[in-house]
Amino acid sequence: MKEYVGGCHCGEVKFKFNSDQAVEIWECNCSICKIHGYEHLFIKHDDFEITDGKDLISEYSFGTKKAKHLFCKKCGTKSFYQPRSHPGSYSINLRCVDEPPDIYKVVHFDGKNEFK
C-alpha cells in the first residue's frame, strides 16, 4: 500500500488515500461519467481523507438519488464521489490524482443500463 494525493482543478479541495501501486479502474457509460471521462478508482472510506477544502464541496444527486456526486464549488471539478455501485467506498477520478498508481485492468461498466 502507498499513500497518494489528489484534488480538484483549482487546488482548493485536496485529498489523500492509500492504495495498491497497480489498480483496477472502471469506465462507466452512464450520462454523468461518460460526459466527464471519469476513471473510477474505488477506495474504502477508511483509506480516504479530505485534507483541504471540505467546506467547498457541493453535492448533486439525480435519478435514484443514491449516488452523491461531489464537486468543488469554486472550479466545478468532481474529483471523487460516493457511488451507488460501491456504498462502502468512494470513487476517485484517477485523472485527479497526482502521480497515480499504475492501471493493470480496465472494467467497462454499463451504468447506462445496469440500474434501470
Image: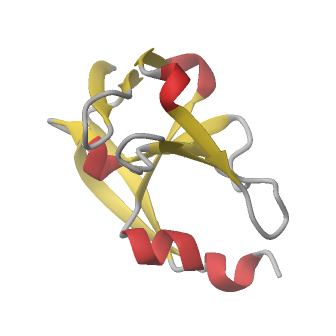
Q: Is residue 116 left or right of residue 51?
A: right
Q: Which of 25 and 70 is in front in this view?
A: 70
Q: Is residue 97 left or right of residue 54?
A: left
Q: Is residue 16 left or right of residue 78?
A: left
Q: Which residue appears at 59% of the width and 40% of the height?
A: 58
Quadrant in which the C terminus appears = bottom right
Q: Image height check: is 86 above or below 64?
A: above
Residue 26 x %, y %: 46, 62
Q: Which residue appears at 26% of the width and 52% of the height?
A: 103
Q: Residue furthest left?
A: 99
Q: Which residue appears at 73% of the width and 78% of the height?
A: 114
Work out whether residue 102 can be spotted. yes
Work out whether residue 48 can be spotted. no
Residue 85 x %, y %: 70, 56
Q: Image height check: is 88 above or below 18?
A: below
Quadrant in which the N terminus appears = top left
Residue 65 x %, y %: 82, 58
Q: In which quarter of the image is residue 106?
A: bottom left
